[in-house]
């Protein structure tokens, strides 16, 4: 499970850097200021939580159900939160906003919060 966590951390971290560069260079020309800020929030949250996954992967055994749910909460939370923001922002540039993604963003945020709560419980159980 540690290898799985570190693999996802490295993939999501690398993608955050790529998406950040894409937003700063390619999207800067086509997005308004509010759209660019939203895109940047997605990138920041993705990168922050990828770093958290790295720390978890190196410091936890990830053998208990609690620890596994913590990892899954962070991974799925990142995917739902950040990637729904990317989809909303990019689709809005063509005036074809994918509105179904709107409710997905807070679900991703809720899973990120769950990941932090499970991290707290995991630390207390050490």
Image (cartoon, rainbow, N blue to C red):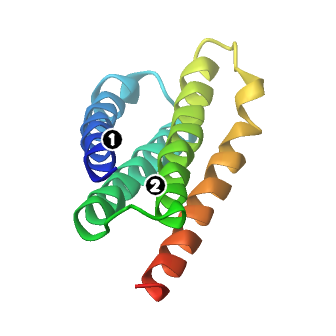
| Depth order, front residue of 17/71 | 71
Whether residue 92 is situated above or below residue 111 in the rendered picture:
above
Q: Position of residue 78 (x, y in %)?
A: 50, 45
**Count of residue discs:** 2
| Image-quadrant location for residue 84 | top right
Picture quadrant of residue 61:
bottom left
Q: Which residue is mark 1?
A: 8
Identify the secondary structure beneath mark 1.
helix
First in sequence: mark 1 vs mark 2: 1
Rendered position, 30 above or below 94: below
Which residue occupies the foreground of this view, 38 or 57? 57
Q: Is residue 78 above or below residue 59?
A: above
Q: Are marks 1 and 2 in contact (CB under 8 Å)?
A: yes
Residue 10: image x %, image y %?
24, 43
Q: Is residue 44 left or right of residue 87?
A: left
Give the residue displayed 26% in from the left and 70% down from the top. 59
Question: Crowding at label 2, few (<14), some or many (≥20) Cα neighbours within 10 Å?
Answer: many
**Position of residue 8 in the picture relative to residue 124 (left or right):** left
For the residues labelled 1 and 2, the Cα–Cα distance comes to: 10 Å
Q: Which mark is residue 71?
A: 2
In the image, 17: left or right of 98?
A: left
Please tell me which residue lies in front, 3 or 81.
Answer: 3
Residue 99, position as x, y percentages in the image: 76, 25
Residue depicted at 57% across the width and 36% down the height: 85
Label 1 neighbour load within 10 Å: few <14, some 14-19, many 20+: some
Residue 27 shows which numbered tag?
none
* Residue 42 coordinates in the image, percent (x, y): 48, 44
111 sits to left or right of 10: right
In the picture, the quarter occupied by the C terminus is: bottom left
**Kind of element beneath mark 2:** helix
The residue lying at 54 percent from left, 22 percent from top is 90
């Amino acid at each position: 499970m540690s290898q799985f966590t570190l693999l996802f951390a490295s993939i999501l971290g690398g993608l955050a850097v790529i998406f950040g560069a894409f937003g700063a260079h390619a999207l800067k020309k086509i997005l308004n200021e509010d759209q660019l800020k939203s895109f940047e929030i997605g990138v920041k949250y993705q990168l922050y939580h990828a770093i958290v996954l790295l720390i978890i992967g190196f410091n936890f055994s990830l053998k208990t159900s609690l620890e596994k749910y913590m990892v899954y909460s962070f991974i799925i939370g990142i995917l739902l939160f950040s990637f729904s923001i990317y989809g909303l922002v990019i689709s809005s540039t063509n005036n074809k906003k994918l509105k179904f993604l709107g409710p997905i963003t807070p679900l991703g945020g809720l899973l990120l919060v769950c990941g932090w709560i499970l991290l707290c419980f995991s630390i207390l159980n050490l």
